[in-house]
Image (tube, grey):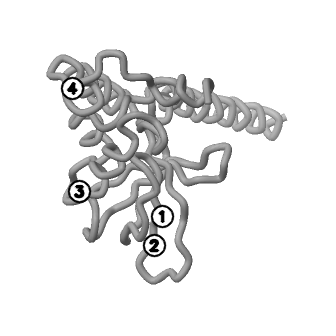
C-alpha cells in the first residue's frame, strides 16, 4: 500500500515537471526566442545585397548564406547593383561573425552578419540598401524586429538609398512580376 502512495506522489511530481517544461517552451516560443549558433570566418563572395558565400575558419568548403530579416533588390532590378555594392563596402575583406538562424527552403543558411558587434543586416536597412523583410520577421527576436522596422522607416523618411525613389518596387513584388 505504501508503494502505491509513493508511486502516485512521484507521478504527480513528474506531471508538474512536464507541465513546467512545456510552459517554458511555450513562453520562449511566443517571445521570439531564437535558437542560434555563431561561427567566425570570412565572406568569400558577395552575390547580391542579401546573399553571400561564407567560409568558416578551418573549413575548405563555403556555405551559401541568406541574410535574415532583409530583402535587397535583385541585381537586374533598379538599385540592385547599388545594394550589392553597399554590402561590399560594409563587409569586404573583414573577418565576420555569422549568427545562424536555420535554413530557408532553398537550403541556404539564414544568418545575421556581425562585424565588431555591428549588425550588418540592420546596417543595410539603415543605409537604405534593403527592406525589412516582414514576411519572415518571426525569424528574428522582438528587439530585432523593432530595430529593423524603425531603421526602414527612418531610411524612408530620409530618402536614403533605394528610398530616393518613392515608388521603389520591393523585391518580393518584383520577383512575382518577373
Considering only order in the chain, which callout, 3 or 1, is on the residue closer to the N terminus? 1
Q: Mark on residue 5?
A: none
Report, in whole angstroms, how far the alpha carbon at label 2 lies from the one at label 4: 31 Å
Pick the residue in front: 128 or 55.
128
The answer to which quarter of the image holds residue 61 is bottom right
Q: Are marks 1 and 2 in contact (CB under 8 Å)?
A: yes
Pick the residue in front: 111 or 10.
111
Report, in whole angstroms, how far the alpha carbon at label 2 lies from the one at label 3: 18 Å
The answer to which quarter of the image holds residue 122 is top left
- Taking the spot 41% from the left edge, 70% from the top edge, the residue there is 44
Q: Are marks 2 and 3 in contact (CB under 8 Å)?
A: no
Residue pointed to by mark 1: 53
x and y percentages locating residue 9 in the rendered image = 70, 33
Nearest to the eye among marks 2 and 4: give it: 4
Report, in whole angstroms, how far the alpha carbon at label 4 lies from the one at label 1: 27 Å
Residue pointed to by mark 4: 155
Left or right of residue 7: residue 60: left
In the image, is residue 30 above or below residue 122?
A: above
- Taking the spot 23% from the left edge, 24% from the top edge, the residue there is 164
Element marked by disc 2: strand
Element marked by disc 3: helix
| The C terminus: image quadrant | top right
Considering only order in the chain, which callout, 3 or 4, is on the residue closer to the N terminus? 3
Considering only order in the chain, which callout, 3 or 2, is on the residue closer to the N terminus? 2
Amino acid at each position: 500500500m505504501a508503494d502505491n502512495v509513493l508511486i502516485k506522489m512521484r507521478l504527480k511530481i513528474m506531471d508538474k515537471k512536464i507541465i513546467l517544461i512545456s510552459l517554458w517552451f511555450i513562453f520562449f516560443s511566443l517571445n521570439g526566442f531564437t535558437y542560434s549558433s555563431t561561427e567566425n570566418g570570412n565572406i568569400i563572395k558577395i552575390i547580391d545585397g542579401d546573399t553571400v558565400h561564407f567560409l568558416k575558419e578551418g573549413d575548405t568548403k563555403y556555405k551559401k548564406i541568406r541574410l535574415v530579416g532583409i530583402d535587397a533588390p535583385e541585381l537586374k532590378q533598379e538599385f540592385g547593383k547599388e545594394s550589392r555594392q553597399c554590402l561590399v563596402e560594409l563587409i569586404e575583406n573583414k573577418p565576420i561573425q555569422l549568427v545562424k538562424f536555420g535554413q530557408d527552403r532553398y537550403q541556404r543558411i539564414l544568418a545575421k552578419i556581425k562585424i565588431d558587434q555591428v549588425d550588418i543586416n540592420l546596417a543595410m536597412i539603415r543605409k537604405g540598401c534593403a527592406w525589412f523583410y516582414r514576411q519572415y520577421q518571426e525569424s528574428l527576436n522582438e528587439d530585432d524586429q523593432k530595430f529593423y522596422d524603425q531603421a526602414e522607416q527612418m531610411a524612408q523618411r530620409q530618402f536614403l538609398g533605394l528610398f530616393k525613389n518613392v515608388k521603389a518596387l520591393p523585391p518580393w513584388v518584383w520577383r512575382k512580376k518577373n
